[in-house]
């Protein structure tokens, strides 16, 4: 039996799906409240934010063109993580308004 091909989702759809993830938003809320995350949650959050950043770069949604690549050894502060996420959401909204 042949599986029907799933339609390929666009980078924009992937970005929206990532940004609307309830776990992502819950963890970002915890950071905003000043709570510490477990190592597993922090690692998962970092991976999701990296995916969001990569998609934003592919879509041309990054500020200034050349974004500095975060060092994998440097742990981002809670504020940096939140700012990174919020700036991406704002840029995505601006991009969608252009259509």
Image: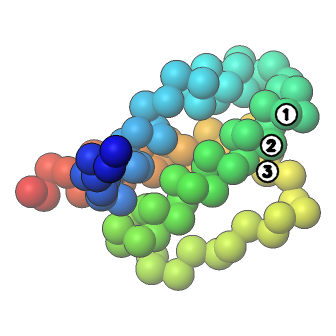
The answer for how far apart the CA atoms under marks 1 and 3 are is 15 Å
Kindly identify which residue carries mark 2: 43
SS assignment at label 1: helix
In the image as oriented, which residue stretches furthest toward the bottom?
66
Q: Residue at x 50, y 30 (%)?
A: 21
State yes or no: discs 2 and 1 in contact (Cβ < 8 Å).
yes
The residue at 45%/76% (across/down) is 64
Q: Which residue is denoted by mark 3 in the rendering?
A: 76
Q: Around disc 3, counting alpha carbons within 10 Å, would you say few (fewer than 14), some (14 to 19), or many (20 or more)?
A: some
Left/right placement of residue 7 relative to residue 66 reads: left
Above or below: residue 67 compared with residue 84: below
User: Residue 20: which disc?
Assistant: none
Check disc 3 and report its element: helix, strand or loop. Answer: loop
Residue under label 1: 40
> x and y percent of residue 59 in the render?
35, 68
Q: Residue at x 41, y 49 (%)?
A: 15
**64 with respect to 74 (left or right):** left
Figure check: 70 above or below 30:
below
Vertical order, 43 against 51 (above or below)? above
| Residues at marks 2 and 3, CA–CA distance in whole angstroms | 11 Å
Look at discs 2 and 3 and give the one toward the viewer.
Answer: 2
Mark 3 and mark 2 in contact (Cβ < 8 Å)? no
The image shows residue 77 at horizontal and vertical percentages of 79, 44
Question: Which percent across, then down, holds residue 58?
Answer: 41, 71
């Amino acid at each position: 039996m042949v599986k029907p091909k799933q339609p390929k989702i666009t980078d924009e759809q992937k970005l929206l799906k990532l940004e609307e993830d309830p776990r992502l938003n819950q963890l970002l809320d915890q950071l905003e409240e000043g709570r510490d995350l477990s190592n597993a949650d922090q690692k998962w959050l970092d991976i999701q934010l990296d995916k969001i950043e990569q998609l934003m770069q592919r879509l041309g949604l990054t500020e200034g063109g050349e974004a500095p690549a975060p060092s994998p050894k440097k742990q981002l502060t809670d504020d940096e993580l939140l700012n990174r996420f919020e700036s991406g959401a704002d840029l995505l909204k601006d991009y969608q308004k252009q259509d």
